[in-house]
Image (tube, grey):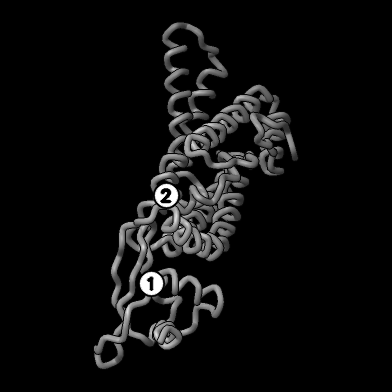
Amino acid sequence: MRLCRISGVEIHLNNAFLALLGLFLVAGVLMKGVIAFTIVLLHELAHVAAARHFDVHVSDIELLPFGGVSRIGGEVVLNPSKEVFVAAAGPTANLMLAGLGTALQRYGLWDADLGPFFLQCNLLVASFNLLPALPLDGGRVYRAFLARRVGFKQATYKAAWLGQFWGVLIVLGGTAGLALGVSGLDVLITGLFLLYAATREKSLAPFHFIRHLTQKKEELAAAGVLPGEPLVSLDTVRLGDVLRSFLPQRFHVVLLLDRNWQYRGVVSEAQIVDALLNQGMDIPIGSLIKKKS
């Protein structure tokens, strides 16, 4: 549901978030629901502010039970340093709000009922989003650091798998809590949505990876120079297998050997990307040398 527009950014409420607000209304604590809504919105606006610091376009925000999703330009996802900065902005904003609440308490500007809820809600949103699981902020930070060692695609799969794991765990815990009467539907809804969102992130990994590869050619054209990363491969290895070793913000040059360990030639990342887009991932990398000669 479209809610409003702030500084050119569309704000949408997800149906699950509406259901959560409905639970607050039914329970007679609508004001707490408004506080939760405001905290989640400020969390997402912090992401928007961080993205705009890098002149990255943000189209809209969708508010979810556990936080939200900001539709931020793909250049953030493909740049680990930027992704860490943008991802950390949300939890940082919540921790700052919690600090502000604590300061207000010391000066007596505190509501005995809503004050502790405000503090608890900020700490809960911050700590939950710091879990190392996509699509949470901690998962984006985890992927950014992991991508430097195993490549963007594998890092996305690992972080999304952790998101699915935590989603299932929260669903099971929420179901048990509901049966025992120690928690409400909000925990179960949050777990289900985390599971759904993590599965969606996993399905988008190949798309982001292709964008990552094609954008690197543009980065090299714009900068003129990028740090290099040499690799050695047998000429019979599939392009898809070679790509798994590619790292962010590095331009790769692959030295090819035949089965007798004899030198066959060198293939650049640009050649591999072009072959990937035109012929697919299953062709042997050695065929690029044949086309060149």
Q: Position of residue 150 (x, y in %)?
A: 35, 63
Residue behind mark 1: 268
Q: Element under label 1?
A: strand
Return the residue nearer the eye: 33 or 46: 46
Residue 259 picture quarter: bottom left
Residue located at (57% from left, 49% from top): 191
Q: Position of residue 181 (x, y in %)?
A: 59, 40
Quarter occupied by the N terminus: top right
Q: Residues within 10 Å of mark 1 (few under 14, many from 20)?
A: some
Task: Confirm or deny contact between disc 1 and disc 2 (CB under 8 A).
Answer: no
Q: Residues within 10 Å of mark 2 (few under 14, many from 20)?
A: many
In the visual, does 228 lie left or right of 171?
left
Q: Is residue 238 above or below residue 83?
A: below
Residue that sits furthest to the right in the current view: 1
Note whether residue 133 is visible: yes
Residue located at (47% from left, 63% from top): 213
Residue behind mark 2: 132
Q: Position of residue 221 (x, y in %)?
A: 44, 58
Whichever of labels 1 and 2 marks the residue nearer the N terminus, that label is 2
Between label 1 and label 2, give the one nearer the viewer: 1
Residue that sits furthest to the bottom in the current view: 260
Note whether residue 157 is visible: no
